Image (cartoon, grey):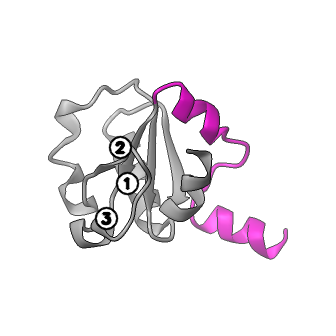
């Protein structure tokens, strides 16, 4: 396994996910960084819900809607994905850093 593949596995990035198709199909992009980080730049159309506040917002979200989580590096988005899945969300993908996800917009 190469270095890049190892990093993807560590950060929970799902291989083979077609983010472009998910976004085109209406996936909700949740940026779990702080409001200050989000205001410094973000994926167009993404929603800022800091990781620490995400659990309080899940009741307003559809559990079968495609969701892509992102952050600065992929660490917090990985945690967000795991938390959403533990709450019964069935179509959640870790988009990693917002910079890398932004190329699909």
Lateral position of residue 17 relative to residue 94, left or right = right
Relative image position of residue 11 (x, y in whole percent): 57, 65
Labels 1 and 2 touching (C-beta < 8 A): yes
Would you say 20 lies left or right of 91 here? right
- Mark 2 sits on what residue? 84
Q: Nearer the viewer, mark 1 or mark 3?
A: 3
Q: Residue at x 64, y 49 (%)?
A: 14
Q: Would you place residue 5 above or below residue 43 in this image?
A: below
Foreground of the two, 93 or 103: 103
Q: Secondary structure at mark 1?
A: helix
Which mark sits nearer the N-terminus, 1 or 3?
Answer: 3
**Residue 48 located within the stretch drawn in magenta:** no
* Helix, strand or loop under label 2: helix
Left or right of residue 61, residue 3 in this image: right
Gap between marks 1 and 2 measured at Cα: 6 Å
Residue shown at the point (23%, 51%) measured from the top left: 54
The quadrant the N terminus occupies is bottom right
Q: What segment is highlighted magenta in the picture?
A: 1-26
In terms of secondary structure, where does tag 3 sit?
helix
Residue plotted at (40% across, 59% down): 42
* Residue at numbered disc 3: 38
The answer to which of 55 and 22 lies nearer the viewer is 22
In the rendered image, residue 99, in percent from the top left (x then y), is placed at: 54, 64
Q: Residue at x 47, y 68 (%)?
A: 75
Badge 1 density bin: few <14, some 14–19, many ≥20, Cα 10 Å: many
Where is 5 relative to 60, above or below?
Answer: below
**Location of the C terminus (image quadrant):** top right
Q: Nearer the viewer, mark 2 or mark 3?
A: 3
Which residue has dot 1 on it?
Answer: 80
């Amino acid at each position: 396994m190469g270095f890049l593949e190892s990093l993807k596995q560590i950060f929970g990035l799902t291989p083979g996910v077609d983010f472009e198709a998910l976004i085109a199909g209406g996936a909700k992009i949740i940026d779990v960084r702080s409001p200050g980080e989000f205001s410094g730049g973000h994926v167009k159309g993404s929603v800022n819900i800091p990781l620490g506040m995400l659990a309080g917002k899940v009741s307003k979200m559809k559990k079968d809607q495609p969701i892509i989580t992102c952050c600065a590096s992929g660490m917090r988005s990985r945690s967000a994905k795991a938390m959403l899945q533990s709450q019964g969300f069935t179509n959640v993908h870790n988009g990693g850093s917002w910079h890398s996800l932004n190329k699909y917009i």
